[in-house]
Each structure stands twice: as structure tokens, then as C-alpha cells.
Image (cartoon, helix red, strand yellow):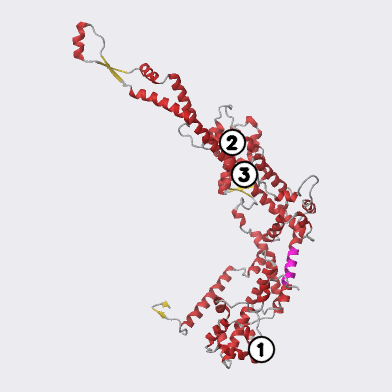
Amino acid sequence: MSFQYLSEEQRARYRRFLTDPSPEDLERFFYLDADALVEVAKKRGPHNRLGWGLKWGTVRMLGTFLADPGDVPHVAVDYVAEQLGVADPSCIKHYAERLPTQHEHAREIRELLELREFAEAEAELRVFVASRAEQTRDSRRELFDRAVVWLIENRVLLPGITTLAALVTSVRAERLAAVNEHLVEQTPVEMRRELLETLVVPTGKKMSPLEWMRTAVSVVSGAGMKEALNRSVAVWAFGAGAVDAGGVAPVKLTELAAYGMSAKAPKIGQLKGSRRVATLLATMRNLEGVSVDDALLLFDLLMSTKLLARASRDEKNAKLKSLPKLRKAALQAESALRAVLDTPMTQQEQPPQPDDQAEESAESGPVVRETTASEMIARIASVVPIEQLEAALAVIKELVPPAGEDEDLAWRAELTNRFASVRGFVELLADTIPWGGTDAGAGVVAALRGLPRVLAYGKHAGVQHIAAHKDLVAGSWRRLVYDNPELGERLIDRHAYTFCVLEALWSALRSKDVYAVGADKSGDPRAKLIPDALWSVHAPSILTALGLPADSAEHLRKLSGDLDGIYRELADSLEANPAITIKDGRLS
């Protein structure tokens, strides 16, 4: 049967009450408005008035008239009875005694609510279901529930469950087939062949190309980074992203790709008709972004855990190992300085005089003179030998950074020793990823793209080759890149420059100043907005699926009018409600 795909609960609640209506449902569907109260007042007998009111609420909530009023939950019966002033709700049992009265009431309610038969609205419903099938990932069960809600909201009487279930199944199948056919038509014949070949395991290999491309590289190393970028190169070589898929909603591409990313290759190969190629195309388009995201995640891990962190850790370890040496040198320098500070700058002495002048010299007092440099050096040497002092000062100069140098100099210098870890993938990183960036990241992207050319000069790379990116070489990188004493004048340390660019890239990726075009996690957040060209294609279908008008002002006017009507209706009923009192502007 066509409705077998529905759940037991869906079948049980279709056109009948499965549970008691909630207070919100009672207010929404069983509340009798002014027109309903006028009409129900014409009925004779409390059981007829109550029966009419229950039919009013039931058809609005279930989309059908129940043959037996006893099937209406007691909470609904009591709620309607309270509105009509019916003291004994049990009188409803008499309403079922006369079928012609029920039929007459049903005709009146149909006219009052302007209810339509299913056949009159079937074409509209097909358009709605088709729009939902094209623009969402709704399953058949979800589409069925959406169709029921649409019929009730548009005041259409529900058909038999078989009729509606079959309609949902056929419309969904038609639209999905149309999506697949459109994708296949847009795919070049040669690409279709190449996509199908990814399902076949090559001779001597353990997995199919599709399986290899779907498997992310997990080894955090330079070799792993190279493999991840090569994987991205292989994916982008198909050119799936260049296929015009503008006629298909992105969510449908995502749905096809989700299956293609999880199903085994033989299972995909068993798909019928155009769905097989459409699934592979969507999968490959998805892999373009996924492979880039995976590669850049690996780059982030490599930089943060294997390169930057390890260089910083090794530099700290080296610093700890040098502490005894530095301490000894500092103590020697301190001893020398203390000797200087303890030596008086001037000295008083009594020069030797002849005996006949002794009495006169005694009267004139001792002679004051300044301490000479040779005396000061002799005093220092008596504490610390000059050779040891010079060695101590050399140690201090080596281990203590000069004034004005930033604290990153030491670990960045250590980082340059790891050039072999990145040399194998730098060119791939620059050329493979479709880089993009904000104004703040444009300089980083330009420097990265030019990095392979700089490295190609080898040891002859000079300042003129990075002149366009000199602003990027800041802080301690400036000293490491430009002032390597082992290099000739106007030559640069290309290892240091490489890490300078990679560190800037790593930082810019984290701040989103640099991103990968077309990627998801590492892509441009602004790219998630629907482009005007794509919106113009899908707008009618999207608006139909959401039940919204094209004019937002019209939608807001309707909401405003509905809200105003509800407030006025509530205000008019306050005086007649004994449970409510208003005193000093306060509602109790």
C-alpha cells in the first residue's frame, strides 16, 4: 500500500484525535469567533449548538468532519460548552441521533469557512510539495506531515490517507529525478566517465579512488601535509565545481553528497539511472571544500603542535640548560662590578718630603688625587682575572637578547632549523588552495603565492625578491631574515622568510583574514549568503515551500493585521468574562 512508509503514529492520528488537544490547540481551533457565535445561536437545543461548535473546531484542527461526535475529546467538548453556556456537556450524545442535522451543519460550516474539496486544491498542493522536495531535505514522512498542515491551513478537506500518501511519493520522486537529470545534463560526458571510474579499485591498489579521496589524512607531519594537499589536487582535477549546478538548490547537492560521502563505492555503483552520476558529481563538489578544510586543519595542527610549540619548547629547554652557564658568568660580572663600586674614585696620600719641609707639609694636609684606570683594572683583576671576565661578558651577550629585541627571537630562530619539515609542501600550499582574503589578509596571500618563486632562487634569494612583502617581515623576523651573518650583503635567509610567511598565514587563517574560497570551515563566512543571481532562480520555489509572499511588506502587514484583530477580540471579551477583573489598569 502507498502509505506503508508512514509511521504507526502518523497513520493513527490522520483525521482523528490521537491525544487531547493542548490549551494552545483549543484556543487556536475551538475558539468560536464572532461569525461562528452568530451562526451557532440560530440552532435549537443545547445539543445542536454544542454539536455545531464541535464540528467547527474539529474540521479546523483535523481537516475533516467526524461522523461520531463522541470521538471528540472531553476537553474540547467542555471548552466549547463553556463558550456556549451549555451547562451539561453530556447532552452531546443526543447530537448523533439525527444524521441530516449533522450534514446540514457541515454544509453551513463549509460555506462559512470557505472550505474546499481536495480535488480543487490538488494542483496547488503538488506545487507546494514539489517546492519542499526541491528546496529541503524533507523525507517522505516529513513531506506528508507538511502536506497535512498545508491542507488544513489552506482550508482544504483532507482526502483519504492513501490518496495523500501516494501524491507525496510521486511528486517527491518526480522532483528528485528532475534534480538528478539536470545535474547529469550539465556534466560533460568525459567527466561522467571519470567520475564512474572512481568507483573501480585499480590493479594493485587496496581501495577505489573515491574511497581514497574521501579519507582524510590524519598524520600530523610535513609528509602528511603533502599527502593532504595532493588529495586536494586530485579532487580539484575533476573540475566538478565548474559544472553549472545553479538550477539545483544547494541543500539537494548537500543531500546527494551526504550519501556519496558515507555509502560504499559498490553501493553507489548500484544506483539506478541518473542518480549515480548526480551523486558522484555532488560528492566531488563537496570534496573540493572538504579536502581543503582537512588540509588546512592539518596545517593548523602542524604549525601549532609540531612546529611553533616544539620550537618554543626546545628554545625554553635550551634556555634552562644555559642557566648554570649564565649564572656563573653573571656572578663573575657582579664581582667585577662590585670591585669597581668599592674602589674610591679619589685617594688621599702624603707625598714623601725632605725633613726640613715635613713640618710645612703637615700643616698643608694630604694630597687628593683620582684613581687611575690602570689601578681600577688592577683592582678588578685581583677579584676576577680579565680573561675570565671577558669570557663571562661573551656568555651574557650570547644568552641575553639585546635591548629592544622581542621575546620571540629565540624560538623563531629555533623554528628556522625545521625548514625540512615544510619544504616538501610549501609550493603545493601556495598553488593548490584557492586562496582569498580580506584587505587585512591580502598581503599574506600575495606573499604566500610568491613564496615558491623566492625559494627557487635558492641561496641567491635577495632582499629585492621580497621587497613587495617587506611589511610582513616585522619584529624579530626582520633580524632573522635580513641579518644572517653567514649570508652575503643584501641576501636573505630564505628559511626564516618561509616561516615568517607561514606563521603569518597560520595567524590570518585563525582570524579569517585569509580563507579558502569554496571551503566550509576555512572558507569565507560571507559566502554563506545567497547570491542575488542564485536567489532569482530559486526564489519562487523557496517562497512557496515556506508559504511566504515575495513582498515582505505584505507579509508584515498581514501579521500586523492578525495581531491587531486578536488584541481587539480579546479586549471585547474581557467585560463578559467573570474570571477577569481590571482594576487601576491591572489585569487579574
Mark 3 and mark 2: Cα distance apart in space? 18 Å
Q: Determine if residue 512 is in view.
A: yes
Mark 3 and mark 1: Cα distance apart in space? 73 Å
- Picture residue at 78% right of the left edge, 59% below the top: 271
- Picture residue at 63% right of the left edge, 29% below the top: 460
Query: Is tag 3's residue or tag 1's residue first in the polypeptide sequence?
Result: 1
Residue 541: name its quadrant.
Answer: bottom right
Residue 157: name its quadrant.
Answer: bottom right
Give the x, y percent position of residue 441.
Answer: 57, 46
Image quadrant in which the N terminus is located: bottom right
Q: Amino acid at mark 1?
A: His
Q: Residues within 10 Å of mark 1 (few under 14, many from 20)?
A: few
Give the x, y percent position of residue 368.
Answer: 27, 17
Where does the magenta region start and end? 167-178
The image shows residue 433, relative to residue 33, as above or below, that is: above
Q: Amino acid at mark 2?
A: Tyr
Q: Amino acid at mark 3?
A: Phe
The image shows residue 35, relative to residue 468, as above or below, that is: below
Q: Is residue 169 magenta?
A: yes
**Residue linked to disc 2:** 497
- Picture residue at 78% right of the left edge, 55% below the top: 266
Give the x, y percent position of residue 349.
Answer: 27, 15
Q: Which mark is residue 299?
A: 3
Local secondary structure at mark 3: helix
**Residue linked to disc 1:** 103
In this view, the mark in front (3 or 2): 3
Query: Is tag 1's residue or tag 2's residue first in the polypeptide sequence?
Result: 1
